Image (spheres, rainbow, N blue to C red):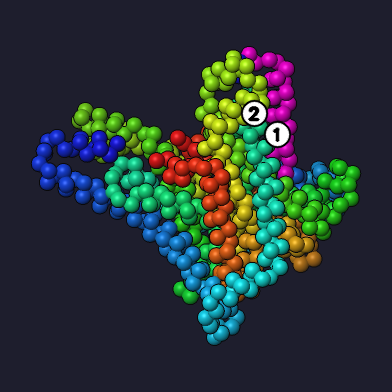
Amino acid sequence: MSQPSPAREGVRTLVSVVVIAITVLPLAWMLSLSFKSGDDINNAQFLPKTWSLDNYRTVFRNDLFTDALRNSIGISLIATAIAVACATGTAYAIVRMEFPGKRLILLGALAIAMFPTIAVVGPLFDMWRTIGLFDTWIGLILPYLSFTMPLSIWTLTSFFKQIPWALEDAARIDGASAWQAFRYVIAPMAVPAVVTTAILVFFFAWNDFVFSVSLTSTNNSRTVPAALAFFTGASQFQQPTAAIAAASVVVSVPVIVLVLVFQKRIVAGITSGAVKE
Amino acid sequence: MSTASATRTAPRHRKPRKQLDHAQRMRRTGWLLSAPAVLIMLAVAIAPLVDAAWLSLFHKRLTTPDANSFAGLSNYWVVLKDPLWWTDVWTTLALTVLTVSVEFVIGFGLAQLMQRALYLRRTLRTIVLIPYGIVTVVSAYAWRYAFDPSTGFVNDWFGTDVAWFDHRWTALFVIALSEIWKTTPFMSLLLLGGLIQVSPDVHEAARVDGAGPWQRLTRVTLPIMKQAILVALLFRTMDAFRIFDSVFVMTGGANDTETVSFLAYRQLVSRTALGLGSAISVLLFACVLLIAFLFIKLFRTDVSKLGSPT
């Protein structure tokens, strides 16, 4: 980054534009497809000739989709809340306390983060059927917890290490109570880390397909990604292409909003979980 | 940190007994705070894995509940003898090698761009995150419909007339494209994390010493980034090896595009052949372990520092 020549900068800007275009293309295509109706769907054109909201109406009138959307929101939020709460405790303990086994927890978590989720689906399928958790919210929340916990523990541990905990002592010396020191000094520094972790966990739960497709069988608990794979459209004779596109747009909106709002934090989260120090 | 907090409470009570109490209390609180997370991970990740290993030793199908007999290692034998398993292994390997290597090259370029671009840098960093967040099933549908000969625009744009999903390699090509689109951002962010550690001073010094751009890349930048590169490649490779969603949506495993995860799913859930399916799961797990082992050997990196915040 010595002397930035205008020619180089021009090339970089051009490449940036191309990258942005390629990144947006599949999403623009889904959006366009979701507004197509009738013959437009099969005309192999990128943009619709006439714009229609029919697909969105179809999708929101379909129980399969609305139930799945409710399941996705409920299950993902609950899993996120519990995972982040438990992981915060663990990460705090790992950073602030000396106890045997903390290294084992970190390594064990890393191992879990790496193993293929499909490997535990069989036994869970069997166990859930036996104890009645098959096709329930809890039946999905539990696996989500155990697979997001490693990520949360690692991300939070690495964030918490950067918090200048000595400030807590300083506040205590200045006469703050333990609670005040935590509330006014530590919490404001810890909250961004917790929010970041929550977003990453939410992405995992929102995105999961393996568990949802294997551990559910009805609208009771099937989440959107799995429901999309079983979508049949308004009638048996209709190709569900455009309806799937509309449903896809609907599930992508929350994610895109989260990305736009928390861009910096997500980057910090992804990199801190893996490559700090 | 911990020693500092130990000495913080210690000075007023110098008696060693108190010191011990404090250490004990800290240990107990530490365990207590970690317990919920550890218990959940043990119960819903470790226990099923052990269970899978156990189940793989039995002839067990849910459709025939009475026929649950000990099989020894015969399930493994059945799997390893079957050409289908090997086809699936090669498919998975081909997808993994193709996607991860392309992602590494593009991801590295993208990381450079995100670090150096003067204009559009912020937009770039934001936009690039979107594929990372998008549901894999959704992106798989987007690519499937784009390449579909009747609905898609791809044949129209490029003047081709290919039935992309009717042939093994064209189908795998589209699957790989969608994976690359989806996960390159993750790769590039991890690499950016490493790139930031390369200080401009070192680069400048190398330049003054007469190193050309290629030498600066291979002798300065890449060695400093080694750790970040290892983590990025390792994480992505393990992730790519368990590919499932895109295959499910795009081909359903037809035309020899089935991957190992998909085979496990088919045996476990569709056929409810728990014994055989578990054997496949265990083999898949072994493959992932092998990949991790090879990576660490290859890079000769201290495992204890691997991606570790400690």
Name the residue that disc number 1 marks: A19
Q: Is residue B100 left or right of residue A110?
A: right
Q: Residues within 10 Å of mark 2 (few under 14, many from 20)?
A: many
Query: With respect to residue A273, does B212 lie above or below?
Result: above
Comparing A95 with B134, the one in front is A95
For image coordinates 58% across by 58% down, the residue present is B287
Residue reaching furthest bottom? B66
The residue under the point 61% across, 56% down is: B242
Residue A12 colored in magenta in the image? yes
Q: Chain of mark 2?
A: B
Q: Quadrant of residue B119?
A: top right
Q: Is residue A62 left or right of residue B288?
A: right
Overall secondary structure of the magenta section: helix
Question: Which residue was labeled with disc 2?
Answer: B113
At horizontal 12% and vertical 43% (from top left) the residue drawn is B16
Q: Nearer the viewer, residue A78 or B98?
A: B98
Quadrant location of the C terminus of chain B in the rendered image: top left
Which residue corresponds to the image point at 30% horizontal and 50% vertical from the top-left?
Answer: A100
Circles 1 and 2: CB distance less than 8 Å? yes
Q: Is residue B1 magenta?
A: no
Location of residue B123 with respect to B289 vertically, above or below: above
Percent x, y of residue A156: 42, 42
Q: Which residues are magenta?
A: A3-26
Q: Position of residue A166 (x, y in %)?
A: 29, 31
Nearer the observer, A229 or A102: A102
Disc 1 and disc 2 on one polypeptide chain: no
